[in-house]
Amino acid sequence: METIDDIHKPYDYSALRFYVMALTVSGPGLTKIDEKIPGYVQNLKGVFVSVGCLTSAGKITGYLSVNFNGSAIKVLQLPVIRTNLLKDCSRPLPLNETIRPNSLLQGYYYDQTNGSAGYPYSLKIYLDYEPIKQPIETPKP
Amino acid sequence: MLPNEKPQQILLTISSIGQTVTIDQETDKLYKSVRGINVVQTDPNAQFSTLQFKIDEVEIFPENWEIIRIKYKEAAPFGYDYYPISQPAGGSRIKGTYIDRGNGVTYPYNVTISLMLVDKV
């Protein structure tokens, strides 16, 4: 059985691959997200969202709603908590999604800070992906 | 006699908002492996600055990777714990870029990137 120590075991960063998408929230309301996912990101294993504001009035800075393969039915929606409150629990949200070639990350971020965070602030979406496995060449007899 | 573990520190000084500092060093030749990394900043508000980091052309942290993800807890003794990585040392080339994102309150401030080296030769 997996123990809590196994679940919260620190990552080996050498074994993981991330792509970090950098966005800027420049004002209140909706921030549109429409970014291309690189071709080498094929199998998503996790998502982590980070907001670069220190002085927001509330714990939640906004709501994120994104889809990966142009599917309006399968949407990832989550409240974004101020990252400097997380510290030790900054593990990615587990996800297992195969990304089609030339896929876009589309959606929006709805700011809830009402200006208390100070604009602009950064919004970063960390995509934890599995690297493409190179085919092993078998020696010819 | 050398200890079996040794922290190798890379010290950066950030003197202005938005400064980009390039890292180009090599690991201690007397140790075979890098087992961990942590980062300490003298200005805790600068934790949303980014660090791209490679050891021997293997990308450990990609572009836009924020320091807050690898920073050690505030008020903890330095060197208390490291985020695990496993890369060969022994003179491996360390390359990286630290970009200040302007969240800092006091300039200049220092950034210490500490690598835990193990397995002495």
Image (cartoon, coloured by chain):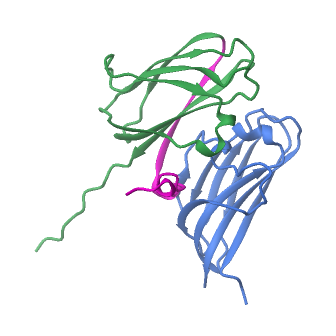
Chain colours: A green, B blue
Percent position (x, y) of residue A47? 47, 36
Residue at the bottom extreme, as displayed: B1
The correct choice, above or below, for A134 with respect to B8 in the image is above
Quadrant position of residue A44 = top left
Residue at the top extreme, as displayed: A29
Percent position (x, y) of residue A133? 31, 53
Residue at the left extreme, as displayed: A141
Q: Residue at x 79, y 37 (%)?
A: B45
| Quadrant placement of the N terminus of chain A | bottom left
Label count reads: 0
Q: Residue at x 88, y 40 (%)?
A: B107
Name the foreground residue: A30 vs B31.
A30
Q: Residue at x 62, y 78 (%)?
A: B31
Q: Is residue B107 left or right of residue B78?
A: right
Is residue A133 located in the magenta-colored stretch of the structure? no
The correct choice, above or below, for B56 with respect to A49 in the image is below
Q: Which residues are magenta?
A: A1-27
Percent position (x, y) of residue B89? 59, 72
Q: Residue at x 68, y 35 (%)?
A: A85
Name the foreground residue: B104 vs B83.
B83
Name the foreground residue: B97 vs B44.
B44
Percent position (x, y) of residue B57? 52, 58
The correct choice, above or below, for A137 with respect to B13 in the image is below
Q: Is residue B85 left or right of residue B9?
A: left
Is residue A16 located in the magenta-colored stretch of the structure? yes
Q: Is residue A94 left or right of residue A116?
A: left
Name the foreground residue: A111 vs A100.
A111
| Quadrant placement of the C terminus of chain A | bottom left
Q: Is residue B24 left or right of residue A65?
A: right
The correct choice, above or below, for A92 with respect to B24 in the image is above
